[in-house]
């Protein structure tokens, strides 16, 4: 089982990548995937309080269960005019 994680804007810059695949355990939540991602990229911790999450292009809470083969997007706040 795997999940594709997409990183955007400053989160991608901090991690040094825009996409990665992680192994997934059945029943794992967004928060659990995020925790494993933070083990690998601790510099992303500063973004956690403001991140939005989308599973297969739908916004979700970090308590949402991640299905096998899903795409999880970590989206920081954006500004502009």
Image (tube, rainbow, N blue to C red):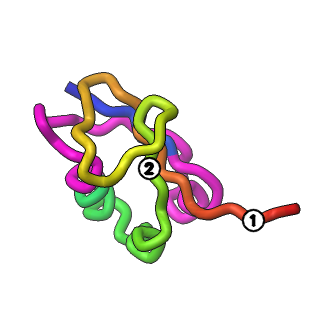
Q: Left or right: where does residue 56 sit relative to residue 34?
A: right
- The label on residue 53 is 2
Q: What's the residue at 22%, 39% (across, down)?
A: 65
Residue 10: image quadrant is bottom right
Residue 14: image quadrant is bottom right
Q: Are marks 2 and 1 in contact (CB under 8 Å)?
A: no
At label 1, counting other C-alpha atoms closer than 10 Å, the crowd grade (few under 14, some 14-19, many 20 or more) is few
Residue to which mark 1 is pinned: 79
Q: Is residue 16 above or below residue 57?
A: below
Q: Is residue 45 above or below residue 30?
A: below
Residue located farthest toward the bottom when viewing the structure as drawn: 46
Marks 2/1: CA distance?
17 Å
Residue 46 % position (x, y): 44, 76
Q: What's the residue at 29%, 38% (across, down)?
A: 22
Q: What's the residue at 54%, 53% (across, down)?
A: 75
Residue 23 % position (x, y): 22, 35
- The label on residue 31 is none
Q: What's the residue at 59%, 51% (across, down)?
A: 8
Residue 80 % position (x, y): 82, 63
Q: Which residues fall within the magenta stretch?
A: 7-33
Query: For the residue labelled by badge 1, is the local secondary structure a helix, a strand or a loop?
Result: loop
Residue 66: image quadrant is top left
Q: Is residue 76 magenta?
A: no
Q: Left or right: where does residue 78 sit relative to residue 42?
A: right
Question: Which of these two is toward me, 56 or 35?
Answer: 56
Question: Which of these two is toward me, 45 or 48?
Answer: 48
Nearest to N terminus: mark 2 or mark 1: 2
Residue 43 % position (x, y): 43, 72
């Amino acid at each position: 089982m795997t999940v594709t994680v997409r990183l955007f804007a400053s989160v991608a810059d901090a991690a040094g990548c825009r996409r990665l695949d992680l192994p997934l355990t059945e029943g794992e939540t967004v928060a659990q995937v995020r925790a494993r991602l933070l083990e690998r990229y601790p510099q992303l911790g500063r973004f956690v309080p403001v991140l939005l999450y989308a599973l297969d292009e739908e916004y979700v809470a970090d308590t949402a269960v991640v299905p096998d083969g899903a795409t999880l997007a970590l989206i920081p706040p954006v500004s502009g005019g």
